[in-house]
Image: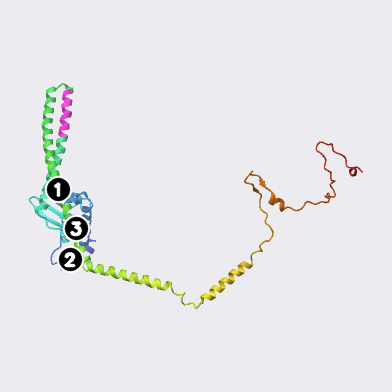
């Protein structure tokens, strides 16, 4: 394998590069470096450190340790990001500072005094937080020691632990005050940065409105509204004119129409029944004097009472009228 591949490859590269090639020297593939640079930038933007504009190189290495384990590979990635104007590097004292491009910007801005001041404040905040945490742990430890000495009967040692705890608590109070001050300053800086972005957005909005309303004026708008109203009125007149078309074009005589209407009315009257000429039968009415029924009109309309005897039906014999108190008499025809 060494004879077939490595030696011919080394000789070819040596002839091209003009020198001896060290086999232990690493090869750099630009495409891989670019891919890793994009991954590091995405890792920074999705992390909690994205709100911090300036980081140390150690913080960046700790953030991307799962992507780039080696320090030399990280140096190559940072150089690629600096070439793409995505990061800015600054060597300061014994540390190297890295500033990433903020989301929404195309390239990173140079590291200024404001960035360094914010970095120092954040560094002090981190240091005070660590010391405050250590002081709280020391205070808890002294409390437990005082309790243990008291149980063992060593009261003097217990009091000594409590005295030390008082000093630690005083130091904790001072550290907490300093930490609150630094956090308040950082909060104001963050609010100022937010206000700056809002003002910048306002400026962009005003510029966009100015360019949008560049060819629009109040006189032009009023003229357009008047033209629209004129066209609307013209359309209404046209619709009103078109709605009257059709009736005036018919050549119809009004006298002929009235004659036809009279004929229709006469034909309708011919279909009515004849009016009766006899007296009308009215319903019985009450006399207003004694509120009795007036039967005169009803009796006059009844037919005459027949004078001949009433013939009974063939299957039913007739029984003559008798007095109510008399006993019934047998008719001779019924028993023959």
| Left or right for 246, reference 89 | right
Residue lying furthest right in this view?
336
The local crowd at label 2, few if under 14, some if 14 to 19, many if 20 or more residues have their Cα within 10 Å, is some
| Left or right for 236, reference 274 | left
Near-viewer residue (109 or 285): 285
Name the secondary structure under disc 3: helix
Near-viewer residue (200 or 99): 200
Instruction: Look at mark 3 in the image and give the residue it sits on.
Output: 202
Q: Which mark is residue 287?
A: none
Q: How far apart are marks 3 and 2 (CA)?
A: 58 Å
Residue 267 seen by the camera: yes
Instruction: Look at mark 2 in the image and give the residue it sits on.
Output: 13
Q: Which residue is drawn at 58% across and 69% down?
A: 265
Q: Which residue is drawn at 56% across and 74% down?
A: 259
Span colored in magenta: 137-150
Res. 40 image quadrant = bottom left
Q: Percent position (x, y) of residue 232?
A: 34, 69
| Left or right for 306, reference 240 | right
């Amino acid at each position: 394998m060494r004879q077939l591949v490595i030696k011919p490859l080394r000789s070819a590269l040596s002839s091209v590069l003009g020198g001896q090639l060290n086999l232990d020297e690493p090869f750099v593939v630009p495409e891989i470096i670019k891919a890793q640079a994009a991954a590091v930038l995405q890792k920074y933007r999705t992390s909690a450190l994205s709100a911090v504009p300036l980081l140390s190189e150690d913080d960046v290495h700790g953030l991307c340790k799962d992507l780039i384990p080696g320090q030399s590979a990280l140096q190559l990635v940072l150089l690629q990001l600096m070439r793409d104007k995505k990061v800015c590097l600054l060597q300061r004292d014994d540390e190297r500072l890295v500033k990433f491009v903020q989301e929404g910007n195309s390239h990173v801005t140079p590291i200024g005094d404001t960035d360094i001041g914010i970095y120092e404040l954040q560094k002090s905040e981190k240091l005070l937080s660590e010391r405050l945490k250590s002081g709280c742990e020391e205070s808890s430890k002294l409390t437990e020691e005082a309790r243990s000495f008291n149980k063992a009967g060593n009261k003097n040692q217990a009091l000594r632990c409590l005295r030390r705890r008082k000093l630690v608590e005083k130091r904790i109070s001072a550290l907490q005050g300093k930490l609150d001050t630094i956090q308040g300053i950082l909060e104001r800086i963050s609010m100022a940065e937010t206000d700056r972005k809002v003002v910048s957005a306002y400026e962009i909005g005003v510029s966009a409105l100015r360019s949008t309303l560049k060819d629009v004026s109040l006189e032009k708008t009023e003229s357009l509204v008047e033209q629209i109203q004129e066209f609307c009125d013209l359309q209404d007149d046209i619709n009103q004119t078109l709605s009257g078309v059709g009736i005036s074009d018919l050549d119809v005589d009004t006298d002929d129409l009235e004659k036809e209407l009279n004929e229709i009315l006469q034909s309708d009257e011919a279909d009515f029944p004849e009016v009766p000429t006899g007296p009308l039968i009215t319903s019985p009415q009450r006399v207003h004097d004694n509120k009795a029924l007036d039967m005169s009109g009803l009796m006059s309309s009844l037919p005459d009472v027949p004078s001949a005897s009433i013939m009974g039906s063939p299957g039913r014999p007739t029984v003559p009228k008798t007095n109510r108190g008399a006993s019934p008499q047998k008719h001779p025809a019924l028993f023959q």
